[in-house]
């Protein structure tokens, strides 16, 4: 096994079961299975008879992460394998990785070590083509908007107020702001445009929240592409192209079935950003898993302030989900970072700093409690952690009365997750989850943002600056003021300042823009500098990638 790249080496060494066997284990009937080769399949939910059952739902979130990630996907997969080992009928529901970041710093998103979903290379690269379909659907709509301008602009669209951008699944900073339509009348109408990464497309959010094809088309029809010269919204329905866009997404709407290294059936489907979108896998996949398994383990992006809050306030509200338990992943290195240690020194033992960083973790626990869920802290053990550090953190959790257990799934797979699994089951049984949403959107976007800022981010207040005051008026004018709010905020801090680590208080949330995502059914509130098209670093991971002589990938992680 390559010491440099354990995730890929472990995944490549694994013997995978045929996907038909995994489907049988999951309870997916043969007639609903659409195999993509031997180890991947789509599940055609329309060919299944509803089971009428709903299993337990366990949501995995994390403390505010370091840039490397704290092991949410790893913990999600390992915890599911632990439940399987205990004899529970279990499924995992995860997001699909975005390709752009894989070439940069972050690597893939299939878990790590002995807790991965496989085939790892396929899932991290083109998989079953869902993201490509979303990309083409998004860009077809962009082309149709520009064609409408070129062909006489019957809808009176103001080219300066088009909010529908193009997308590509590459971290390509040069495409953030572009000018299109140059070269004379035959080349279209010149205007400013730009590219986002695919996971930032509203089509991605729409696909992940749609209950079926009909709902998908209804949501696509509602997407607002821009505004007229009179400031009236222009929707996909006005353009009359909702049918074509939905047609391009027909197969992408079907959940993808794969397996974990422990042989647990896994649905890996959809992948919206956790800042400008809601950050969790598709509702279709979560519902399918819940209808088949006794326990479904799922993950929401970033920490309790972003992915988990949106899972609970947006996805659960729309999809009628009610989580039974939550896990907050913590690591000694993230605790040390929140305790003031510089990135370069995170590997050295520092118990005081780890304990100082618990302020951040404690607030994530309190946040989950605000939704009526008593979470379990999964302390994800890294090879550089010392026993003294781990014991100090677990001792602190005991003193606080928090449920906590060591997670060693990266090193030992499902066996390493049994302690966390037991705590989760105990929480379901003894702590009696009483799930409720944090806010009622009927209070209006301003009030919702105040509630989020005060209760989840520890802020004193919200200021609306730049375009936000005018956007608030626009939302009210169009009847969009009572939609749930999806906050785009840095994942590194509870505040909108990525350098404010720990558990900051007394700060103010700066909302600078409010973007209606009417197809998805929420309003995005942009705070701080949130990037919708990332760039590549000085030394992109792509430099270390390639194929061996026998055609195996190297350099993926
Ligand atoms: P997240 O979902 O929080 O972004 P991941 O589960 O994707 O995090 O893990 C990020 C990276 O960290 C992966 O490369 C994974 O292999 C690695 N990792 C996770 N947990 C551990 C651990 N306990 N020890 C060593 N590496 C780990």
Image (tube, rainbow, N blue to C red):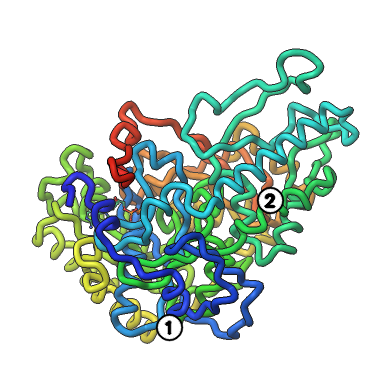
**Residue at (76% x, 52% y) in the render:** 222
The residue drawn where x is 41% and y is 39% is: 497
Q: Nearer the viewer, mark 2 or mark 1?
A: 2
Residue 330 appears left or right of 354:
right
Q: Tell me if mark 2 has few (under 14), some (14-19) or many (20+) residues whose alpha carbon lies within 10 angstroms of its own.
A: some
In the rendering, at what x and y percent does residue 205 appear?
60, 53
Which residue ends up furthest to the top in the rendered image?
A: 184
Q: Which quarter of the picture shows residue 264?
A: bottom left
Provide residue 67's location: percent of width, then percent of height: 33, 43
Kindly tell me whether residue 312 is visible in this rendering: no
x then y, percent, for residue 290: 51, 76
Which residue is rendered at x = 64% and y = 38% of the image? Answer: 468
Using the rendered image of the protein, determine whether residue 448 is visible from the camera's viewpoint.
yes
Disc 2 residue: CB within 8 Å of ligand 1: no
Q: Secondary structure at mark 1?
A: loop
Residue, disc 1: 432
x%, y% of residue 462?
55, 45
The residue at the far front in this view is 550
N-terminal-most mark, 2 or 1: 2
Tell me if 378 is positioned left or right of 269 in this view. left
Q: Is residue 116 left or right of residue 467?
A: left
Residue positioned 45% across, 82% down in the render: 294
Mark 2 secondary-structure assignment: helix
Choose between 137 and 71: the one closer to the eye.
137
Residue sitting nearer the eye, 42 or 238: 42
At label 1, counting other C-alpha atoms closer than 10 Å, the crowd grade (few under 14, some 14-19, many 20 or more) is some
Q: Is residue 490 above or below residue 27?
A: above
Query: Would you name the residue on which mark 2 appears?
Result: 248
Q: How many marks?
A: 2
Residue 228 as seen in the image, left or right of residue 396: right
For disc 1, does the CB lie below 8 Å from ligand 1?
Answer: no
Real-space Cα distance between discs 2 and 1? 43 Å
């Amino acid at each position: 096994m390559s010491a440099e790249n354990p995730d890929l080496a472990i995944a490549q060494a694994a013997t995978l079961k045929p996907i038909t066997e995994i489907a049988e284990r999951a309870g997916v009937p043969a007639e609903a299975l659409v195999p993509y080769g031997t180890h991947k399949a789509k599940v055609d939910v329309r060919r299944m008879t509803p089971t009428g059952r709903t299993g337990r739902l366990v949501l995995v979130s994390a403390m505010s992460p370091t840039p490397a990630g704290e092991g949410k996907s790893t913990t999600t997969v390992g915890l599911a394998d632990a439940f399987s080992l205990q004899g529970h009928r279990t499924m995992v529901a995860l997001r699909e990785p975005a390709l752009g970041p894989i070439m940069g710093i972050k690597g893939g998103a299939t878990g790590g070590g002995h807790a991965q979903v496989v085939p790892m290379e396929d899932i991290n690269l083109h998989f079953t083509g869902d993201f490509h379909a979303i990309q083409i659907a998004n860009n077809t709509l962009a082309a149709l908007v520009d064609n409408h301008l070129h062909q006489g602009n019957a809808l009176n669209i103001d080219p300066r107020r088009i909010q529908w951008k193009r997308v590509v699944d590459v971290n390509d900073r040069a495409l953030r702001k572009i000018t299109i339509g140059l070269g004379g009348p035959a080349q279209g109408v010149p205007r400013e445009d730009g590219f986002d990464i695919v996971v930032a497309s509203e089509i991605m959010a729409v696909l992940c929240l749609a209950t079926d094809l009909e709902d998908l088309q209804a949501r696509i029809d509602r997407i607002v592409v821009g505004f007229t010269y009179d400031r009236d919204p222009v929707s996909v329905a006005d353009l009359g192209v909702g049918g074509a866009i939905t047609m391009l997404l027909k197969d992408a709407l079907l959940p993808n079935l794969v397996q974990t290294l422990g042989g647990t059936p896994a649905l890996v489907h959809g992948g919206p950003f956790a800042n400008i979108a809601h950050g969790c896998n598709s509702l279709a996949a979560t519902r399918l898993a819940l209808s088949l398994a006794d326990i479904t383990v799922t993950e929401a992006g970033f920490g309790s302030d972003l992915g988990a809050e949106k899972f609970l306030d947006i996805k659960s509200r729309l999809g009628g989900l009610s989580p039974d338990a939550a896990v907050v992943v913590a690591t000694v290195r993230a605790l040390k970072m929140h305790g003031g240690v510089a990135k370069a020194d995170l590997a050295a033992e520092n118990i005081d700093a780890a304990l100082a960083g618990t302020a951040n973790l404690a607030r994530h626990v309190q946040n989950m409690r605000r939704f009526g869920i008593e979470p379990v802290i999964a302390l994800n053990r890294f090879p550089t952690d010392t026993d003294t550090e781990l014991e100090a953190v677990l001792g602190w959790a005991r003193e606080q009365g928090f449920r906590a257990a060591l997670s060693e799934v990266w090193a030992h797979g499902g066996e390493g997750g049994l302690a966390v699994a037991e705590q989760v089951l105990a929480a379901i049984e003894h702590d009696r989850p009483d799930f409720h949403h944090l806010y009622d959107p009927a209070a209006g976007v301003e009030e919702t943002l105040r509630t989020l800022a005060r209760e989840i981010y520890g802020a004193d207040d919200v200021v609306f600056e730049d375009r936000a005051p005018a956007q608030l008026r626009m939302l009210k004018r169009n009847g969009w003021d009572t939609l749930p709010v999806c906050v785009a905020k840095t994942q590194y801090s509870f505040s909108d300042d990525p350098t404010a680590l720990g558990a900051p208080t007394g700060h103010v949330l700066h909302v600078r823009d409010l973007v209606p995502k009417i197809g998805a059914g929420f309003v995005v509130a942009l705070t701080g500098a949130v990037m919708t098209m990332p760039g590549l670093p000085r030394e992109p991971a792509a430099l270390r990638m390639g194929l061996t002589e026998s055609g195996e990938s190297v350099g993926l992680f």
